[in-house]
Amino acid sequence: MQPMKRWIHHTAAVAMFLAAAVAQAAGIVGTTFPPGFPVIEDTSLAKPVIGFGAAGPVTHTPVILLHGNNDTPFPTACNPYGAIQALAQYLADHGYGTSELWALGYQGDQCDLGADPTLRSRIAHTNAANVPDLRRFVRAVLAFTGAKQVDIVGHSLGVTLAREWIREDEAQPMVRRLVAIDGPNHGIINCSPDPANYWQLPALGGFTPSSDICQEVGSPDTPFLRLLNGPGGSSETEGPTRVLVIRNADASFVYFPVQDGLLAPVPAVDSFGKPTDFSRSASLRGAREIPLTGQGAYDPFLHTSHLGILNSPQTWQATLEFLREGPQ
């Protein structure tokens, strides 16, 4: 039986390799890492990170794509979104090789949320907990591709995750460009102690003021965001990295106290119970900025602007144009 099992495993591995090669040749962004890419263990989950990338020539600066909280780099059995993959496919359709497009899934496939929804706001989903995963992933991509720099495209929590890694490692010279899509740079609206903040319910994630996520981004005045942004925003875009902010200007359920698709609004109050305007949370001092409206049209499930903006043709085109500007 042992030789038969080995033959079956070998045959399956060959089939997977051939399928990946065919997809790469066709310019299709996949759901795996290429042979020879190191296995990176998720620091919080104690199992390999998920994501995608491919082997092949590299002529553009490699792009690392980072999803937001409670999302994945591609759709999974437990998460129908994963729109980072669609953005990557748009880049592949417009001149990028699949070998230049990489994504890190730093929270797994999200299947653990079914048993405990409060994981959405707990330590494994924080910026701080996932910086080690991103640090090792960037280094692995640089080593695998032979590139000297990367570009990063982040959505929501992926924005502050990238910024925190850059801050901790003083990695500005390693990051040529950063596209920051609707990121919680100055906090989120979902963490207040106000009784009308339904996100506090355990079934909806348990975003209470004391939860780990809210300790980080529940207010513009959390220790995490004060350190990340610097006094008066002095550290928001310092260094050689060029930054483009793409944000919602009319609705976003993590920033605006207005209806966002199927999601009802919550009061504009921070985690300390202080009335706070989060509507410009995604902005970064010194960055180029593109404000968009009507992005809920691109969220096929909840019709929200915060999720729709990642799946938006306007976002995709602006990202491509920004990454292509100037010498590669």
Image: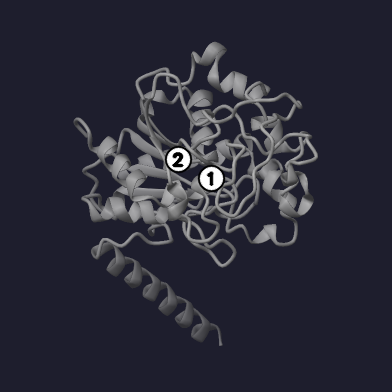
Mark 2 neighbour class, 10 Å CA radius: few under 14, some 14 to 19, many 20 or more: many
Relative to 213, say whether 205 is above or below: below
- Element assignment for label 2: strand
Image point 67% across, 24% down: which residue? 222
Nearer-the-camera pick, 321 or 291? 291
Q: Position of residue 224 (x, y in %)?
A: 64, 25
Is residue 55 visible from the viewing direction of this image? no
Residue on which the image places disc 1: 68
Mark 1 neighbour class, 10 Å CA radius: few under 14, some 14 to 19, many 20 or more: many
Contact, CB < 8 Å: mark 2 with mark 1?
A: yes
Q: Position of residue 163 (x, y in %)?
A: 49, 29
Relative to 291, say whether 169 is above or below: above
In which image quadrant can residue 151 be found? top left
Residue on which the image places disc 2: 154
Query: What amino acid type is highlighted by mark number 2?
Result: Gly
Nearer-the-camera pick, 131 or 209? 209
Q: Which mark is residue 87?
A: none
Residue 147 in the figure: left or right of residue 272: left
In which image quadrant can residue 171 be found? top left
Image point 60% across, 19% down: which residue? 227
Q: Position of residue 268 (x, y in %)?
A: 66, 32
